[in-house]
Amino acid sequence: MTKRTPMAYTRRKALFSATVVAAMAPLFAGAQTPDTDDERPHYVLGVDGMACPFCSFGVEKKLSAIEGVAELETSILAGTVSVIMAPGKTLREEEARQAVEEAGFDLRDFKDISADDGPGAS
Amino acid sequence: MCLRIPRALFKGLSIGVVVLSSSQVIRAAPLTFNTALPVAENEFVIREQFIFNRSSADPSTADRKRAAWSIASAVGYGVNSDLAIFGVLPYANKQLKMTSGAMRVTRQAEGFGDFKIFGRYTVLKKNSPGKNFRIAPFAGIEIPTGANTVRDALGRLPAGVQPGSGSWDVFGGAVATYQTLDFQFDAQARYQANAKADGFEFGDVARFDGSFQYRLWPRTLRSGVPGFFYGILETNIVHKQTNRIGGARDFNSGGTTVFLVPGVQYVTKRWIVETALQVPIVQNLHGAALKNDFILRAGFRFNI
């Protein structure tokens, strides 16, 4: 049988406290420092024909050439490219369509996620 | 000999590096022929492939053994998403060992081969979620940039050992690709009409190719863009007409060969490594035409 010493109890208590603080830190951090991603226009493009990693690279390369595009994230399974613009910049559907078609594929749909998340979004 | 091959390889790789430095975009394709997948507008595609080809089953008493390695550098440019222009330049070392009289002789040549340039236009395109289908005819010309009059102490080398053909040859055909997230199928029909140069004419070549690429890993796709590990099985049906020497047919040349080509390919967003072995399963060749043992291919591609 293991004998619990006061020192061991103190160490466990300190470890538990540290874990709780670490787990809750992002909540408080979020409250103090707004997530900049939420302030940036965010779009999700459905791309038809994208079926391999190289295809996705070609589409990303064309989209990244559009002025104001800050981040891209592709889901090859969903056939979507998530586009985050720099603050104050917007992505027009025709720009996105042209970039996708120049890569050899088709724009299936175009969603402005930041508009969906904004006030009054249903 | 032992010193020459590494030096030659270094030369070939240097050429590859030079070409690679101009590349921007590439995409997946079969190992033994082209694909109908698009080249993005104003973007470049590139492919480097090392090829080792050995033939030793000689039905004649000359006991010929032919070995050749080459590095083929291919660059493509997307004029728009439907029209692409490709250029292919090989650098090769070809060696032929044979018995001549009572002596065993080795004849070889090394250098750039003939430069191919061709255009491919997509006439049918259907994109849908996670899949696409394309048909694209192509046509081009093989320019005689390789030497075809190399000589050694025994005289002019046989045409099969020369780095180039010396002739302006035209070719054309069509390629189709059906690609899904799980597999890809490519098929090609191609014909090359060879012309005469310096009294020699290679026979025309007709070929039919098929490639099936199946994603072995990851078995289940999730979010993001993981690397794809493909198992590949290709087949090539190659028919060569007889060569002509001084206008007369060489009945010890030409014939039909069927290759079965197992291979693997690992594809990421930025690079590919791939290898395949072309194994002749049928060789119906004319007369004493030299039979092929195997062709080994290994290549890499980069997105820069």
Image: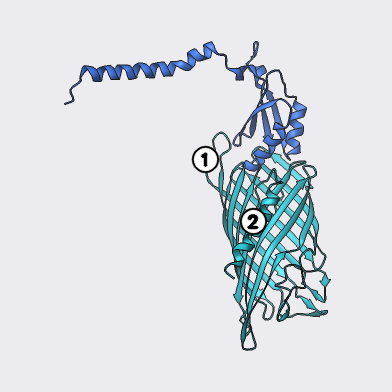
Give the drawing colour for chain B. Answer: cyan
Q: Nearer the viewer, residue A108 or B72?
A: B72
**Is residue A19 in view from this perspective?**
yes
In which quadrant of the rendered image does the C terminus of chain B lie?
A: top right
Q: Position of residue B295 (x, y in %)?
A: 61, 65
Disc 1 residue type (three-letter): Thr
Q: Nearer the viewer, residue B186 or B54?
A: B54
Query: Helix or strand or loop: what does disc 2 sit on?
Result: helix
Residue at point 52% right, 14% down? A30
**Is residue B37 in view from this perspective?**
no
Residue occupied by mark 2: B13
Tell me, by letter, which chain the rendering colours blue. Answer: A
Relative horizontal placement of residue B170, taking residue B221 as reference (left or right): right
Task: Give the answer, above or below, for where B298 lies relative to B124.
Answer: below
Task: Give the answer, above or below, for where B132 lies relative to B199.
Answer: above
Q: Residue furthest bottom?
A: B102
Disc 2 residue type (three-letter): Leu
Q: In this figure, what is the number of numbered marks?
A: 2
In which quadrant of the rendered image does the N terminus of chain B lie?
A: bottom right
Protein chain holding label 1: B
Q: Quadrant of residue A11?
A: top left
Q: Residues within 10 Å of mark 1 (few under 14, many from 20)?
A: few
Residue occupied by mark 1: B220
Q: Position of residue B262 (x, y in %)?
A: 57, 59
Q: Position of residue B200 (x, y in %)?
A: 80, 75
Q: Position of residue A96 (x, y in %)?
A: 73, 30
